[in-house]
Image (cartoon, helix red, strand yellow):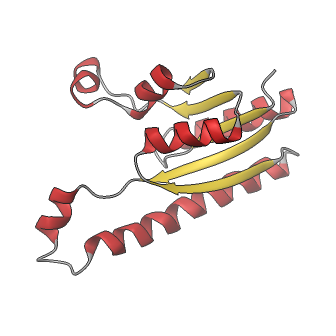
């Protein structure tokens, strides 16, 4: 039923739970996993304020964020392969919801699994959240881990 699953890992406290649930679910259903981490760029107002303190803060931030994201993905794939689950790791850059949705369509995924950010109703109403946007726009079922 769920042959191709896309698993979003953001490095939050929920990421280990999402990874563990995805591997268990994939092993039981003989599914393949695509672990994805999206590096979000710093907003322009942040980089414009920090440019006086740190030269090229956006570039340094992106390098460190990509390094961290790749380590997170490599560890997840290693854990999946140890359990006999086929996986791939994809590191993207941009708006997390948009990048994740584009990848899901490209991979023709059957399921998206991700963590909730735990935002309260008021914060979610004001700011929106990646998990909320995904549940509204995804072309397939979304499994949210709390």
The residue shown at (14%, 77%) is 53
> Eyeballing the image, is 29 above or below 79?
above
Q: Position of residue 120 (x, y in %)?
A: 29, 22
> Eyeballing the image, is 111 above or below 45?
above
Q: Position of residue 60 (x, y in %)?
A: 35, 75
The image quarter containing residue 47 is bottom left
The image quarter containing residue 63 is bottom left
Q: Is residue 146 visible?
A: no
The residue shown at (54%, 51%) is 37
Q: Is residue 58 left or right of residue 7?
A: left
> Eyeballing the image, is 52 above or below 21?
below
Q: Is residue 37 visible?
A: yes
The image quarter containing residue 46 is bottom left
Picture mark count: 0
Q: Position of residue 26 (x, y in %)?
A: 79, 33
Q: Position of residue 141 (x, y in %)?
A: 62, 20
> Eyeballing the image, is 15 above or below 94?
above
Q: Is residue 99 left or right of residue 108?
A: left
The residue shown at (15%, 69%) is 50
Classify the position of the N terminus by image quarter. Answer: top right
The residue shown at (48%, 24%) is 137
Q: Is residue 131 left or right of residue 53?
A: right
């Amino acid at each position: 039923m769920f042959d191709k699953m896309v698993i979003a890992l953001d490095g939050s406290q929920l990421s280990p739970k999402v990874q563990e649930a995805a591997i268990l679910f994939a092993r039981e259903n003989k599914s393949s996993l695509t672990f994805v981490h999206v590096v979000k760029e710093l907003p322009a107002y942040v980089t414009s304020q920090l440019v006086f303190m740190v030269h090229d803060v956006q570039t340094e931030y992106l390098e460190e964020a990509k390094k961290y994201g790749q380590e997170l993905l490599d560890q997840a794939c290693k854990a999946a392969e140890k359990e006999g689950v086929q996986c791939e790791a994809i590191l993207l850059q941009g708006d997390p919801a948009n990048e994740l949705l584009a990848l899901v369509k490209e991979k023709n995924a059957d399921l998206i699994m991700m963590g909730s950010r735990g935002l309260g109703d008021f914060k979610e109403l004001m700011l929106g959240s990646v998990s909320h946007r995904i549940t509204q726009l995804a072309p397939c079922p979304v499994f949210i881990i709390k």
